[in-house]
Amino acid sequence: MSVSIKSERELGLMREAGRILAITHDEMEKALKPGVSTWEIDRLGEEIIRGYGCIPSFKNYRGYPASICISVNNEVVHGIPSKKRILKEGDIVSLDAGVIYKGYHSDAARTHGVGRISSEASQLIQVTKECFFEGIKYAKTGNHLNDISSAIQAYAESFGYGVVRDLVGHGIGSHLHEDPEVPNFATKRKGIKLRPGMTLAVEPMINAGQYSVKWLDDDWTVITEDGSLSAHYENTILITEEGPEILSKV
Ligand code: MF3
Ligand code: CO
């Protein structure tokens, strides 16, 4: 397994990819309203990304048929946008998007509520975001990958939530998925030692109920096995001597 160290030139491109991705997320969030279809959100996201001269990295990735992954309520990740999927008040929607700028990737996900949502749903969204920030407290030179992973798990489980085991975060750079895998749960091995210039997509996927998931017949959409709500929060980060730098931000 080889984990690449990015040069300043590469990091400049990844910062620009991340900036454009963050803008795309902000615009998609504004468009989330009752009555809007997930297909419309996908169209909007792709238009913005291409408007900046970038490529939506998920499109056709291993045959994925859209640009944005849009997962509603009990859907965990990789929901396929559809004209028939109309958002309604109270839904929670995870938007996951990737941008390629001059050959370099950024990957980020956010979960939002549509109109007024239950307090249970809003706590899940909030805690999932906090899981990311708890994890990256440990994203600094000399720590090990498992320091990030175990912090995420401990925080999520302190709320009684289930941490998805079947999907993980990943290294990222000139490819969407690079080494290493970045689990959101503790592993027996302490994992690689973190070094400056490593870039990671850290992406907690947290279920309100049990951690187990299953795949729908479309072979993409992942849903919670117990039907509980699920949330996703992801950023592309850079390891530095001082700590993490979030690249997927404006
Ligand atoms: N954020 C997801 C990941 O890191 C997005 C990949 S979805 C796909 O795996 F459509 F591109 F496959
Ligand atoms: Co990712």
Image (spheres, rainbow, N blue to C red):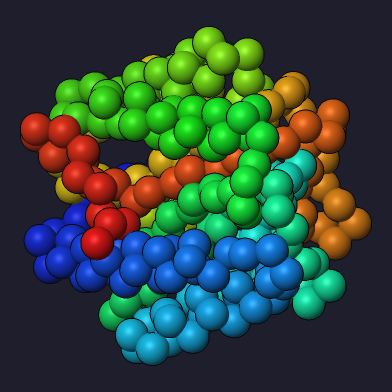
Res. 152 visible in picture: yes
Q: Residue at image x 55%, y 50%?
A: 112
Q: Find residue 157 and report its image quarter.
A: top right
Q: Residue at image x 61%, y 53%?
A: 115
* 189 shown above or below 6: above
* Residue 7 drawn at (x, y percent): 14, 59
Return the residue nearer the eye: 184 or 20: 20
* Residue 127 drawn at (x, y percent): 49, 28
* 133 shown above or below 238: above
* 182 shown above or below 93: above
Q: Find residue 68 and report its image quarter.
A: bottom right
Q: Is residue 161 left or right of residue 49?
A: right
Return the residue nearer the eye: 137 or 130: 130
Q: Is residue 238 left or right of residue 214?
A: left
Res. 166 visible in picture: no
* Residue 156 drawn at (x, y percent): 53, 20
Q: Residue at image x 84%, y 72%?
A: 84
Q: Find residue 248 and report its image quarter.
A: bottom left
